[in-house]
Image (tube, grey):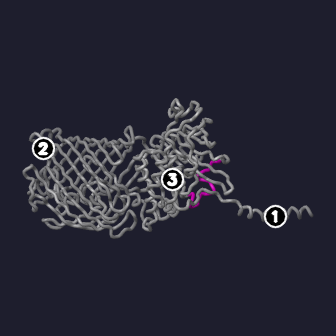
């Protein structure tokens, strides 16, 4: 009996102590409050300047773990460091600082352009970074903390799942484009303050996400070109992470499953948690963010790209906190502009519809065709190297456009791009005559049906400067007052574009300079009838005045077309003036001629700021221009002008709804557009 009593007592004591023990057990740790963000030194990072590596290193051993070359050294202070070489060293050093500033636990990493290592043995990996005298170039040094060996943890199954801090870490992975989210890159260490969770390898960051043929590490231009936010709902947000392997490798089922599942890590994140981490990051200055990349040894040009891109991504997170964002459909949240510079400059607005293989499309027609709407299907990342697209558009003025497109975003390097496409176009266009003295009572319409084949090759000379060449062959049939005209014309051209415009916050700011030269000749039955050269120069400036809510827009454009050897230019290929884009206050295509010059201005003022991106603006406009056939027709009295104004609602960096009126000598014209101005 006594033994039973003792057993029951022991069980009772045990049951009573279980909750006490549970209460005393420390919770897992993944985030710590860093205090005042402005006081953080991101050039030195989590270790601070007092814990930086020494100058004299002694070789200990080489490490064969992981994919990057690594070895251990000890400095003159007796501190052991893990040295890493190769393409990961810059991005990992920067990523560690940015995550640490956001409150996450990271390693103490330092980048050194070069170090001298005594007793360095020949490395099995990374020997190309070592010179004969023991100088090693491009080194990331990670302090060996001396703590107990860490264990790995899974993104999908850990004690932190569902917490605000863990969801913030998921957002950070999307923000830095870390595409290698395997469990082996995560570490957890037991401490007196609780089990500490961290990411121990951040080397696959700050490039482009994708399969093994497309992804990159530490490539600034490819990071800047990547999309960040995929979809926003009233309660959750999805970010962009491409990790699905190239489909022929699906035969390796375990790897295909692991890589594909990684994309879910940045999906379905509670909106409130994304807002929380965004507000934390907003406290960092652009100088602090730039210091992360300076510490990583990036070039000044790359530091500027990374700083601008990270700031824009932080701004996007901050914009999620606006009440109206929760009411935005996924399509509206992801609208982006897709611009093609040649043969004609044109912009279409692409709107995601929940899959990378389909988008709704708006625009795609020159002025006077009404609003173009349609859809586009794409192979996206399914086929390596090339993206295939098919687009169909119809306009409110009965226009039609169909396009098949093959785009190669990287030809030999990430800065060279190629595009080949076929287009079918049918639309009606206004005709008022040819020359500077065409009469206002001549107002008719002609239809145009065009099939064309185009190709372009472009090169990014710098972050804002692009040049390229293009070729086109087009067959055109037009009908004007029952007079049918046909032509087949081939053209070759080159262009140069300098564009610093920024739509990420408020009114557009920056400049855009564009120049193009081309030659065109008739083919087949058109041979000898049509031949000309053409030059286009277009300069646009968006100048803030006294603050972000007021801006002056100015534009100067000239186009010169010169017939050769007694040949002509088809009337539908002449330069023109008149309409929303080419001197407001006149009908579209009011004047046609060989040469045109345009001077336009617009003063914008935000009257209702809704978010850093959205707002309601009012504006006043003043335009003037002239058209002439030959030099003697250019006169001081030949200018045609218009004055007006209107209102616009900026919905996204790519799209705005504009209604405006402008008055010229022939009356008042009203224009409606989905544009942020010229």
Residue where numbered disc 1 is placed: 13
Q: Is residue 45 magenta?
A: no
Tell me which residue sits at (44%, 56%) in the image.
286
Q: CA gap, disc 3 to disc 1?
A: 51 Å
Q: Are marks 3 and 1 in contact (CB under 8 Å)?
A: no
Residue where numbered disc 2 is placed: 563
**Left/right of residue 543 with respect to residue 179 in the rendered view:** left
Give the position of the C terminus as an image quadrant: bottom left
Q: Quadrant of residue 337?
A: bottom left
Q: Which residues are magenta?
A: 150-166
Q: CA gap, disc 1 to disc 2?
A: 102 Å
Front-most of residues 89 and 508: 89
At label 2, counting other C-alpha atoms closer than 10 Å, the crowd grade (few under 14, some 14-19, many 20 or more) is some
Question: For the view shown, which residue lies furthest in the left direction?
Answer: 632
Tell me which residue sits at (15%, 67%) in the image.
667
Residue where numbered disc 3 is placed: 42
Q: Nearer the viewer, mark 3 or mark 1?
A: 3
Mark found first going from the N terminus, 1 or 2: 1
Our reading of the magenta stretch's main secondary structure is: loop
Give the position of the N terminus as an image quadrant: bottom right
Report the number of numbered marks.
3
Q: Name the element at disc 2.
A: strand
Q: Name the element at disc 1.
A: helix
Q: Name the element at disc 3.
A: loop
Mark found first going from the N terminus, 3 or 1: 1
* 278 w.r.t. 450: above or below: below
Q: Position of residue 543 (x, y in %)?
A: 29, 59
Q: Position of residue 27 (x, y in %)?
A: 66, 59
């Amino acid at each position: 009996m006594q033994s039973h009593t003792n057993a029951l007592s022991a069980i009772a004591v045990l049951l009573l102590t279980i909750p006490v023990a549970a209460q005393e057990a420390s919770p897992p740790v993944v985030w710590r409050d860093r205090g005042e963000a402005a006081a953080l030194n991101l050039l030195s990072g989590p270790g601070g300047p007092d814990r930086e590596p020494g100058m004299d290193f002694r070789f200990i051993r080489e490490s064969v773990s992981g994919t990057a070359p690594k070895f251990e050294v000890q400095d003159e202070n007796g501190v052991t460091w893990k040295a890493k070489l190769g393409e990961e060293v810059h991005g990992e050093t920067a990523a560690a600082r940015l995550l640490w500033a956001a409150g996450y636990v990271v390693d103490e990493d330092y980048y050194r352009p070069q170090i001298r290592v005594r007793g360095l043995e020949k490395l099995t990996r990374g020997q190309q970074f070592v010179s004969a005298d023991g100088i090693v170039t491009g080194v990331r040094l990670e302090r060996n903390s001396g703590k107990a060996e860490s264990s790995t943890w899974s993104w999908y199954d850990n004690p932190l799942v569902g917490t605000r801090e863990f969801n913030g870490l998921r957002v950070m992975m999307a923000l830095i484009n870390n595409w290698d989210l395997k469990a082996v890159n995560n570490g957890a260490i037991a401490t007196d303050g609780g089990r500490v969770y961290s990411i121990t390898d951040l080397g696959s960051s700050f490039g482009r996400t994708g399969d093994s043929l497309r992804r990159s590490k530490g490539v600034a231009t490819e990071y800047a070109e990547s999309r960040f936010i995929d979809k926003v709902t009233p309660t959750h947000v999805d970010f962009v992470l491409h990790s699905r392997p190239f489909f022929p490798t699906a035969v390796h089922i375990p790897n295909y499953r692991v890589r594909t599942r990684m994309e879910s890590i940045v999906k379905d994140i509670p909106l409130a948690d994304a807002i929380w981490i965004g507000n934390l990051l907003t406290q960092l200055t652009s100088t602090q963010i730039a210091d992360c990349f300076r510490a990583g040894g990036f070039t000044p040009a790359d530091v500027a790209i990374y700083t601008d891109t990270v700031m824009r991504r932080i701004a996007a997170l901050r914009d999620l906190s606006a009440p109206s964002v929760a009411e935005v459909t996924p399509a509206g949240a992801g609208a982006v502009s897709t611009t093609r510079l040649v043969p004609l400059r044109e912009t279409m607005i692409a709107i995601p519809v929940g899959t990378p293989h389909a988008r709704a499309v708006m625009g795609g027609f020159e002025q006077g065709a009404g609003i173009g709407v349609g859809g586009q299907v794409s192979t996206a990342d399914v086929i390596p190297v090339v993206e295939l697209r098919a687009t169909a558009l119809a306009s409110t003025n009965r226009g039609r456009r169909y396009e098949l497109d093959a785009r190669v975003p990287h030809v030999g390097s990430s800065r060279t791009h190629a595009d080949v496409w076929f287009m079918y176009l049918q639309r009606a266009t206004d005709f008022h005559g040819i020359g500077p003295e065409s009469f206002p009572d001549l107002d008719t319409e002609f239809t145009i049906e065009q099939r064309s084949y185009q190709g372009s090759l472009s090169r990014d000379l710098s972050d804002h400067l692009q040049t390229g060449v293009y070729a086109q062959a087009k067959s055109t049939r037009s009908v004007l007052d029952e007079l049918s005209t046909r032509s087949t014309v081939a053209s070759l051209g080159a262009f140069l574009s300098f564009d610093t415009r920024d739509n990420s916050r408020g009114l557009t700011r920056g400049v855009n300079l564009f120049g193009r030269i081309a030659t065109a000749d008739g083919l087949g039955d058109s041979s000898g009838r049509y031949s000309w050269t053409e030059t286009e120069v277009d300069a646009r400036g968006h100048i803030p005045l006294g603050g972000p809510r007021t801006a002056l827009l100015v534009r100067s454009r000239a186009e010169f077309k010169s017939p050769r050897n007694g040949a002509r230019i088809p009337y539908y290929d002449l330069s023109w003036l008149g309409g929303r884009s080419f001197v407001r206050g006149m009908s579209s295509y009011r004047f046609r001629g060989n040469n045109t010059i345009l001077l336009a201005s617009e003063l914008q003022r935000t009257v209702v700021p809704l978010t850093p991106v959205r707002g309601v603006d009012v504006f006043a406009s003043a335009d003037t221009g002239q058209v002439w056939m030959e030099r003697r027709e250019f006169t001081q009295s030949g200018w045609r002008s218009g004055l007006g104004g209107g209102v616009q609602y900026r919905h996204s960096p790519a799209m705005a709804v504009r209604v405006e009126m402008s008055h010229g000598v022939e009356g008042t014209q009203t224009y409606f557009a989905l544009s942020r101005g010229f």
